[in-house]
Amino acid sequence: MSDLSTVVLALAAAGGAWMAWPVPLPIAIGVVGVALLGRWPIILIVGAALLTGTLAARSWAGLHPPRDGAVAGVVTLLGDPATVGAETRVEVRIGTKRVEAWAHGRAARSLTDRLAGERVEMAGRLESVPSSARARLSAQHIAARLSVDRVGAWHTGDPASRLANGVRRTLTRGAQSLSPSHRALFLGFVLGDDRGQSAEVVDDFRGAGLTHLLVVSGENLAFVLALVGPVLRRLAIGGRLLAAAAVLIFFGLLTRWEPSVLRAVAMVSVSMLAWAAGRPSSTVRVLALAITALLVIDPLLVHSVGFLLSVGACTGIVLLARPIADALPGPRPLRDALGVTMAAQLGVAPVLIPVFGGVPVASLPANLLAVPAAGPVMMWGIAAVLPAGVAGGFVARAVCVPTGMLIAWIAGVARWSAAAPLGQLGVAHLLVVGALVLAGVAVRTRRGRLVLVGCATVVLLQPAAGLAAGAPTWHTQPAPGADLYRAGSATVLVVDTARPDQLLRAVHAAGVRTIDLLVMTKQSRTTSAAVASLLARIHARNVAGADAGEVIVGPIDVRINPAGVVVARR
């Protein structure tokens, strides 16, 4: 098969997984078998679509929830428990079913120190997944929810899980001298563990286009392979393959098989097999075959935003990084860095725009400033902080000094970039930029490329100019449970019920930098946390409760009483 045929094969596998047509499994397997025996690429492409389609249909059909009612027994944790508001969420396996468990109070505190792979005694009540979350949870193979009433004794998991959890706990001990915020970021950079990251920090990285640093990716895997490379090179081909496979599996266990990890591990596996067979392959072919294999193993990955973002970024870099770098003027290192950044952003745009509303313009300078510091954090975390976690004491504190400095720089870049009023790129912007990139590949003269770069710069600055010149809309609802009013230079935000991540992200996306009056109509724990996260990043000149009476903010008249809030223009 040519490289183009493998790309079509991956697209066919993705299409079949998305459509989930219930073709009889023997027919799908038979078509694939005939194609392989006859070496017919077109039939193999059709067979891949049929196979992933029927496997997806069978996966959806297998999501029948267990019978509702009380349950008690030992469950296996499939993920690390995470705090969500006042509760703790964790995915568990009950029998053969994957279940989302929620605990609060004493039960939640009993799960705080547990990790994936461990077995825990639980008692609670099984319930069907609410319709509002059914599509999202079903794509993760979750069949039901468990309301946990009691958590009892716990037991270690299998040997591989015990080893992986031991490494994670050792890394956490090694980073203990870092501030809580920096420690959470460090664990995100090295392990992809985002449980300790505050809503405002996550919003900073999202607004700066740096969320890819908070998940483990192929770069982390490359560092691990670089560390074990000298040992692997001393082995024969068979031993090298077995040892590398063990490293990949352990890396997946350590990082909890996140979608980006699955993509990276699959690509390395395909590359190793091609090398062992004496058939080196292009990166395009390796990526396409890895995607196809993953969708056959788990066709529901096609609905995972994380998987789509990882594939999109990798595809953009593979196809566009070099042409963009060649078309740009300036020194080679800067051109290469810009090429990779722009290619990755163009690659993830088809996912980012419909899901998150756009691609931040700030992502270009933010990645150029932050990524060079993120690499040493990952490498240092694996090579130095892990041994420091064993040694402890002064050694661990000394090792974390450069780590803390680098993380402080990355966090600062994220915060400054997210706060910059640069706006977001939409579909039209990216289509124009893409056309300019293609034109840059065709144009050979220096003057012509400079003209194209100037045009691209104008396109990238347009969202910022639009924010500065555009008249604000009088009333919008940026997030569920929040109302935003703007008239002239005055801004009023009324918060009834809101989640921390949604409120901060929505207000930032609306281009709000200062709030003249913030009204809280309810004092629930979740709403208070949302407002606290908002105030940590956006200045509010006045904050009022439900009994503040009448407040005049420039041309806006706000009447506040326990019965409700009335906002009108004066």
Image (tube, helix red, strand yellow):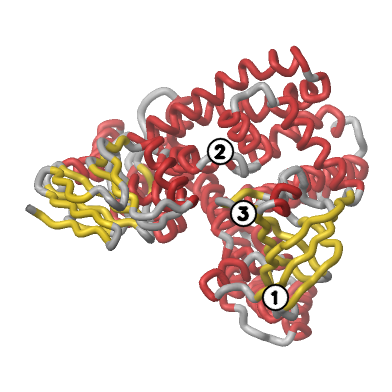
What percent of the width, then of the height, locates residue 207?
A: 41, 42
Q: Is residue 47 visible?
A: no
Query: Which residue in the rendered view is the most extreme toward the left?
Result: 570
Does label 3 or label 1 sit earlier along the sequence?
1
Residue 484 appears left or right of 72: left
Residue at the image position 46 percent from the left and 49 percent from the top: 501
Residue 266 appears left or right of 341: right
Residue 87, numbered label? 3
What amino acid is labelled 2 in the image?
Answer: Leu
Distance between the alpha carbons at the discs numbered 2 and 1: 31 Å
Q: Secondary structure at mark 2?
A: helix
Residue 207 appears left or right of 58: left
Residue 213, numbered label? 2
What amino acid is labelled 3 in the image?
Answer: Glu
Q: Residues within 10 Å of mark 2 (few under 14, many from 20)?
A: many
The residue under label 1 is 59
Does label 2 or label 3 sit earlier along the sequence?
3
Distance between the alpha carbons at the discs numbered 3 and 1: 29 Å
Residue at the image position 82 percent from the left and 50 percent from the top: 277
| Quadrant hosting residue 51 | bottom right
What amino acid is labelled 1 in the image?
Answer: Ser
In the displayed structure, would residue 382 be above or below residue 211? above
